[in-house]
Amino acid sequence: MGVYEVIQNRRTIRRFEQTSLSIVQLRKYVDAARLAPSGANLQPLKYVIVHSTEMVNRMFERVRWAAYIAPDGTPELGERPTAYIAQIVNLEIKKSGYELDAGAAMENILLAAEEDGVGACWMGAIDYAGISEMLRLKEEEKLVSVVALGMKAEQPVEEAWQGDVKYYKDENGTLHVPKRPLDEVILGEM
Ligand SMILES: Cc1cc2nc3c(=O)[nH]c(=O)nc-3n(C[C@H](O)[C@H](O)[C@H](O)COP(=O)(O)O)c2cc1C
């Protein structure tokens, strides 16, 4: 699969098979993040791989799923993520303006996972204080976001735009994700 095809196929996954991902595979996704572009090449981002059963369960209690369709988007027992990667910024390396670095690096994780057929959900609606404590982050280490990972147990689809940003599940439980059309997002061609 070429990169463009990976980009087209990637959808946020919130239901997972319970086969675990190897630490080698999880480290590969952090490596993809490590290689992302970084303003002034400061590379202020760090990562914690969460993959033990105990820590994965504790993480699940501290993240919120699919606000538009809550509680229907929350994975049931037996379809929850099998790993998480927490993205952290070291404020001693960069105090502000790291958000673009963070976005580029997280997208690299999502795309590298997608290429392997691994599902991912980037999560910002999280208990920042609770997760920071759980990961024993130091004062200069600030949690940016987390990504939930696991083998896919669903395949959401891109939806033709009908004027609403809200994703929804159809009668078969398939998630439909509306995307604004190309001609709406191109402001000009000069
Ligand atoms: C910065 C950011 C934060 C997000 N936070 C959450 C979250 O907390 N919980 C969740 O279920 N999905 C979260 N998502 C996933 C979005 O809901 C999802 O990307 C969006 O609905 C579009 O779907 P797609 O990723 O399949 O294109 C987040 C996505 C981004 C980019």
Image (tube, rainbow, N blue to C red):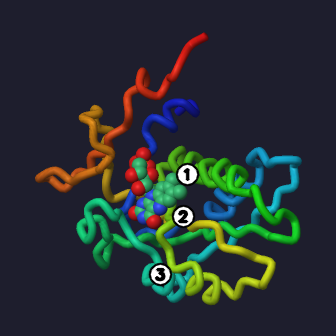
Label 1 C-beta lies within 8 Å of the nearest ligand 1 atom: yes
- Asked if one can make out residue 11 in the rendered structure from this viewpoint, the answer is no
- Asked if one can make out residue 112 in the rendered structure from this viewpoint, the answer is yes
Q: Amino acid at mark 1?
A: Leu
Left/right placement of residue 18 relative to residue 188 reads left
Q: Could you tell me which secondary element the residue under label 3 belongs to?
A: loop
Neighbour tally class for label 1: few under 14, some 14-19, many 20 plus, Cα within 10 Å = many
Residue indicated by mark 2: 147
* Relative image position of residue 143 (x, y in whole percent): 66, 73
Label 3 C-beta lies within 8 Å of the nearest ligand 1 atom: no
Q: Could you tell me which secondary element the residue under label 2 belongs to?
A: strand
Neighbour tally class for label 3: few under 14, some 14-19, many 20 plus, Cα within 10 Å = some
Image quarter in which the C terminus is found:
top right
Residue lying at 74% horizontally and 67% vertically, measured from the top left: 89
Which of the marked residues, 1 or 3, is nearer the chain's N terminus?
A: 3
Q: Is residue 68 above or below residue 85?
A: above
Residue lying at 51% horizontally and 37% vertically, measured from the top left: 7
Q: Amino acid at mark 2?
A: Val
Image quadrant assignment for residue 94: bottom right
